[in-house]
Image (spheres, coloured by chain):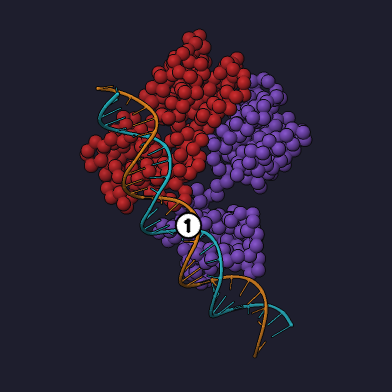
Chain colours: A purple, B red, C orange, D cyan
Amino acid sequence: MTRVLVVDDDPRLQRTLTIALRAHGNEVVTAADGRTAVQSVLEDAPDVVILDLGLPDLDGTEVLRRIRAASVVPVIVLSARHESDDKIEALDLGADDYVTKPFGVEELLARVRAAVRRGGDLGRHLGPIVTDHFVLDFAERRATVEGEDVRLTPTEWRVLEALCREPGHLVQQQDLLRAVWGPSYGRESNYLRVYANQLRRKLEPDPANPRHLVTEPGLGYRFNP
Amino acid sequence: MTRVLVVDDDPRLQRTLTIALRAHGNEVVTAADGRTAVQSVLEDAPDVVILDLGLPDLDGTEVLRRIRAASVVPVIVLSARHESDDKIEALDLGADDYVTKPFGVEELLARVRAAVRRGGDLGRHLGPIVTDHFVLDFAERRATVEGEDVRLTPTEWRVLEALCREPGHLVQQQDLLRAVWGPSYGRESNYLRVYANQLRRKLEPDPANPRHLVTEPGLGYRFNP
DNA sequence: CGGGCCCGTCAAGAACGCGTCAAGAGCCGT
DNA sequence: ACGGCTCTTGACGCGTTCTTGACGGGCCCG
């Protein structure tokens, strides 16, 4: 499912867009000002951003600049102005597309599809994680232990990725389950025990005494780089 | 230097664009009809295409389709029509941007810059790839295995090219499908399995144990030179 | 000391993804 | 219109991965 961040200070337009996007199978998060928008890009990791210029707190181009500083997520700029100058500025600042109000919802949806198609799921990628014992490259799906390539299964990667998004921090079982197996798997199950085990065997120097993939009894797991 | 292919049957507009683009440091090649355009995409390997719909010989969407069949080069569509429907159709067919006439030259230049920035050097021909076992010359469409010429079909070339653009890197199924079969083929299908098989038979020393065209289960394929 | 809880471990069946094959449709050029 | 080449699509077998249940051990608490 595509996650779309809608940034607009007009509640009516925001509502219209949210409904239309949800109706076409997208997940929608919203922000009404620039600072919230930038924060949401960081925290929610949307697949695409629809950004209305002319926000209350920050200049539109400034918001764009900050988003670009934080992420490579595709941005579609929305503007009431007709002047080509704005378009040029926005596109050169790193916007991926530009739509002038008034616009048809269908058109916007098409542009969202196009932007997502181009952008893929960049913006979500984790940098490689390097320890003295192994190297994890999530973008390439490549794991190296003591110089040897090690095969991890898709699910193993997902578990590892969920843990590595917050290195050194506790990730609760519930969150981990949901991140890997979907929202309905909030309850207990063997999954985590099995996969923690699997990962330790493949990655830890001494699987019996884990140094990197640590259990927090009753709570969840922690990944130490 | 950016190479731009301008496809338009109006000599005046063609001339205007050529001058403007050259003035901004671009190399320009032109075509006045659809067939010439497709040919030029193949031979000149432009970095970006500006395509006016409503050409004398072929329907606009047909030209787009053929360009997409031949290359992943970014395409900016130019049209006199205002209807959103055309925009949607064009964008879904794989156009990267859509500009309605009349437009300012500055705006078009900005969109060209944006398209090139996004597209990277797609569209450029790849240099030849040489291994101890085979040689691939994409510009000439010539493959040599153990000194023997081998015929590859157009689709085989496209799959190979999509993989070889990032040698040694994982290319996800979704990206591969879209690069070769167009944006609407994001879903699963037999295509990749069949063509990976085909290519391995033709190129690999031991097709059963591929060394160059490697499967990453659940994700995609990787090409190792 | 005994019991409950939680985790690690193992193994077996099910489900899934990939490689493979082959038949039919479509698209050329002759 | 014909023949050849490609592309598309379905089917099948096999190996891998996922899921699930069972069992044992450590730890905390009463």
Residue placed under numbered mark 1 in the picture: A153
Above or below, comparing residue C15 to residue B137 in the picture: below
Q: Quadrant of the C terminus of chain B?
A: top left
**Point 57% across, 46% down: residue:** A124
Disc 1 chain ID: A
Query: Left or right: where does residue A41 sit relative to residue B109?
Result: right
Front one among A33 and B195: B195
Q: Residue furthest top?
A: B12
The part of the image, by quadrant, that contains residue D30 is bottom right
Q: Position of residue A204 (x, y in %)?
A: 49, 65
Q: Quadrant of the N terminus of chain B?
A: top left
Give the number of marks: 1
Front one among A40 and B163: B163
Residue A223 in view in this figure: yes
**Point 44% across, 57% down: residue:** A151
Q: Residue furthest left?
A: B147
10 Å neighbourhood of mark 1: few (<14), some, or many (≥20)? some
Q: Position of residue A121 (x, y in %)?
A: 55, 43
Query: Left or right: where does residue A151 sit relative to residue A171?
Result: left
Q: Position of residue B176 (x, y in %)?
A: 45, 40
Front one among C22 and A50: C22
The part of the image, by quadrant, that contains residue A16 is top right
Residue A70 in view in this figure: no
**Point 31% across, 36% down: residue:** B152
Q: Position of residue B65 (x, y in %)?
A: 46, 27
Above or below, comparing residue B174 to residue B96 in the picture: below
Q: Secondary structure at mark 1?
A: loop
**Point 58% across, 35% down: residue:** A113
Q: Looking at the picture, which amino acid does disc 1 mark?
A: Thr
